[in-house]
Amino acid sequence: MPVNRVITFVLLLTGFNSIFSQIDAVTMKNGDVLIGEVKSLNKGVLVLETDYSDSDFKIDYDEVQGLNLTNTFVIDLTSGKHLVGSIASLSDGNFLIQTKTGERIQVSPKKIVNINSIDDNFFSRFSGNLDLGYTITKAQNNRQFTFSGKINYKSDLWVIDTQYNILDSNQDNAASIKREEFSLTSKRFLYNQWYAYANYSYLLSTEQGIASRQNPNFGSGKFLIVSNKLFLVCALGVSYNIEHYFDQSFDKESTELLGLVQFEMFNFKDFDLSTELTVFPSLSEKKRFRTDYNFTLKYDLPLDFYVKGTLNLNYDNQPAVKGNDLDYVFSTGFGWEL
């Protein structure tokens, strides 16, 4: 079990939790006014830090009537505009966005789907989550450990995501099962909801006989739906596939096209759902076709904790080991979100 890598990931995540005070005002539809520092609006939830509470307030954005924000924020609109500036409430119920370039833009509150602070502190731009699972079964002395962690960095033009997942299962009189995944993605916002990206992914799967699959790829994508409840994105790219198997006679390299569809539903009575499908039709291997699929259902608990179930699936119609064309893992875990 790569415990050292898990510990390193946790330390990186918790090390980015820096807090810096500013004065923002959030006016609720019931007339209450909350004073503190707005940290973000993401997936329909506004996060506010206050001096009078040890934990951040998480506010349903549908219940917000007014915002007066003094910090500089990255502001994403449903129209695809990507702005950098501050926000103030107007008497007619709309918001005024004052951009760093001097523009003054009036928008309806429903047109704002993401707000992220980009103050001068580097570490304040990070967010993330981690979850753990451990199962012990008396029959055959079965023990299974799962870990999943994410770190996200966002600036005015760039988003960087990194993710690490592991499953390690052992039982008497059976071969150990191990699956390890890592990905690092960098996105650069362009215009009209388009973006360019570069990605590196790594997979180890004993079930498919894969000692190491490294997959650098790049391309472009577009946000088709962006709202406070739904998210849909599609992307196309080119991938270079470097595969090393436990049986080294199967080692190979290939070039592939890449097509991705990602869909998310969030903030539905504390439930979040996300699913992602990636297909890899080969350019250099005749009729080879690979698929990666991920599905996650998460339920939010108090104090930034959550429980979730995840399905990860890999399919290869030309596997190195006959009969091992499909590998999937279903796991449950208890986690914490930063």
Image (cartoon, grey):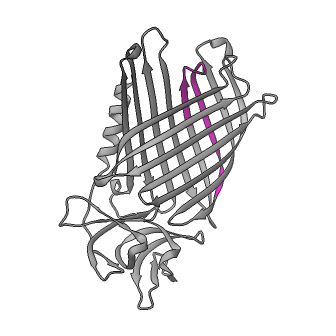
Residues drawn in magenta:
201-222
Q: Is residue 206 magenta?
A: yes
Q: Position of residue 262 (x, y in %)?
A: 60, 51
- Going 54% across and 25% down the picture, which residue do you hit? 204
- Going 66% across and 51% down the picture, which residue do you hit? 235
Q: Position of residue 74 (x, y in %)?
A: 46, 67
Placement of 195 over or under 65, stated as above or below:
above
Q: Judge left or right: residue 226 versus residue 320.
A: left
Foreground of the two, 334 or 10: 334
Foreground of the two, 29 or 317: 29
Placement of 74 over or under 238, stated as above or below:
below
Q: Judge left or right: residue 240 versus residue 22.
A: right
Question: For residue 302, what is the image quadrant?
Answer: bottom left
Placement of 286 over or under 184, stated as above or below:
above
Q: Position of residue 318 (x, y in %)?
A: 73, 24
Foreground of the two, 248 or 266: 266
Placement of 266 over or under 227, stated as above or below:
above
Prevailing secondary structure of the magenta residues: strand
Residue furthest out toward the bottom = 91
Q: Judge left or right: residue 210 versus residue 29.
A: right
- Going 49% across and 12% down the picture, which residue do you hit? 175
